[in-house]
Amino acid sequence: MGPVKVIFRDEEMVSPMVLTHVEKVRNYDWVDMEWYCLPSSAEVWVLGRREYCLLWSHYRASEGRLTRDMPSWAIRAENFGLSPSEPIPEHYDYYMMQGKVGRTAFITGVRANESMMRYRSLVQKLHENYIVTPYRLKRSIPLRFAKVIYDWTTDDVLKFISEEHGAEYCEYYDVAALTGSHIRVGIPLHSVAIRRLGDVVATEPEFYDQLYRCWPHIDAQRRIWADFNLEKHIMQYADDGWDGVRRCLEENIVTPGLNTRAKAYCAEFRRKHTKDPRSYPLHWLIRNLLISEFASRAVTPIGPGTRAYTIQKEIESE
């Protein structure tokens, strides 16, 4: 069948240990790897303050503020006739599909027990629930994700790789186990991952130094987060009514494009709040603005079992 075709989506802020392992795999004689470094948006979240940066930004490169140099072998924006100074206009998978013939499946492994979102993506269909269409990809592109390994735990994966096949795996997992750090790797500065920024210091301090050089204010997250009362922060804005919402936008949503989307989200939320304030309380809006991926999702009511639902019950019982 020929070499195994492999896709690696390099998001710039990648663990050096992961990069070392991927480069090793890239050089296997039975691997044909495509390594993509395309300008796309990422989040830098510090104590509720949200800004978006452009990965592999031409401007940051000119200022010496990339976390590392782009590999010489990478497929980049210029290969598609695009500007390296602007985010790619299509979904990432659109570019990875260029040159592929016929129906294509990307075979991936998923530890579904790590995330409810991952789990739901695998059980929401009645048949072949492990075969899914990538989110927001054009229907004209015949690509599917085949998540054929979806019910293995981390122990299952490591047993299969190391005990049953004696194969190599990324050194990061050993270091994470020794330091008690999180085993998930990826961009470490978004609203969820940055809460464990100390794990980066514990596992790869030089990597933290690279991130700090580009975004010095992340050190506030590392130093203050353990004592930062996020719930109090949310309620301080919510208790101020719609003036608090406006203040939240001004103080925390600092990127112009994101701020515009946040205002549109608030306008839709306000319409629903007017009709049903119990299901759409202002503290729920503030929580979404500060923590959630509101820019790409619809306005939804509070769900049972959530932290916001508990708070709402407490407010109503006072």
Image (cartoon, grey):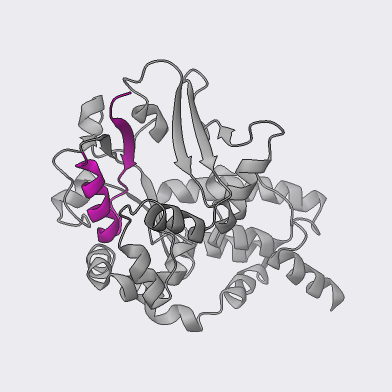
Residue 7 part of the magenta segment: yes
Question: Which residues fall within the magenta stretch?
Answer: 1-28
Among the 4 quarters of the image, the one containing residue 281:
bottom right
Number of numbered callouts drawn: 0
Most distant residue in the front direction? 164
Snapshot quadrant of residue 190? bottom left
Indicate the quadrant containing the C terminus: top left, top right, bottom left or bottom right: bottom right
Name above or below for residue 42 compared with residue 290.
above
Q: Name the image quarter holding residue 234.
A: bottom right
Does residue 285 sit above or below 310 in this rendering? above
Screen quadrant of the N terminus? top left
Residue 165, horizontal then vertical, whole percent: 37, 51
Residue at the image position 56 percent from the left and 46 percent from the top: 150
* In-front residue for pair 195/148: 148
The answer to whether one can see residue 186 in this image is no
**Measuring 13% from the left and 41% from the top, which residue is drawn there?**
72
Judge whether 42 appears above or below 40 on screen.
Answer: below
